[in-house]
Image (cartoon, rainbow, N blue to C red):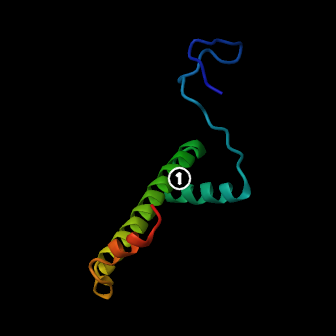
Amino acid sequence: MRCNTTAVSDTLSGMPTTRPRVLVTETDELKLALDEAARRWPGGSRSALLVRLALEGHQAAQAEHAAVVQSRVDAVERWSGSFSEGYERDLLERIREDWPA
């Protein structure tokens, strides 16, 4: 559903945006999150608090993903070359010679 700034009705004299809107039902869990957010950031509307929670959650998810990626990079760097001594230099070439063409 998109709002149209040119549409005029009996109840609305034009919407302030053409951007999509999101309708959310305030479940018990969301109510708790919004109540806690209101204590953390007093004075905001529930809509503004929901936006702030969504943006903070997005930032937290990005940071968590970056940490996971970095831990994988660290593991690769830590183990890089660790097993090279156990194999002869031309082993892969010799194995490929036995493969069907």
The image shows residue 34, relative to residue 70, as above or below, that is: above
Residue type marked 1: Leu
> At x 39% / y 62%, what residue is drawn?
66
Query: Where residue 97 sits: x, y (%)?
Result: 38, 70
Instruction: Using the image as rendered, state which of residue 76 and residue 81 is in the foreground.
Output: 81
Query: Where residue 93 sits: x, y (%)?
Result: 33, 72
Q: How many marks?
A: 1
Per the image, label 1 sits on a secondary structure element best described as: helix
Which quarter of the rendering shows the C terminus? bottom left
Q: Is residue 9 left or right of residue 93?
A: right
Q: Is residue 38 left or right of residue 94?
A: right
Q: Specify the quadrant of the image occupied by residue 94.
A: bottom left
Q: Residues within 10 Å of mark 1 (few under 14, many from 20)?
A: some
Query: Where residue 49 sits: x, y (%)?
Result: 54, 48
> At x 68% / y 43%, what residue is drawn?
24
Query: Where residue 30 sits: x, y (%)?
Result: 66, 55
The image shows residue 89, relative to residue 32, as above or below, that is: below
Instruction: Using the image as rendered, state which of residue 99 and residue 7 is in the foreground.
Output: 99
Q: Is residue 57 left or right of residue 14?
A: left
> At x 53% / y 50%, what residue is drawn?
54
Residue for badge 1: 53
- Outermost residue toward the bottom in this view: 86
> At x 28% / y 87%, what residue is drawn?
85
Instruction: Using the image as rendered, state which of residue 92 and residue 73 is in the foreground.
Output: 92
Q: Specify the quadrant of the image occupied by residue 36.
A: bottom right
The image shows residue 93, relative to residue 41, as above or below, that is: below
Which quarter of the rendering shows the N terminus? top right
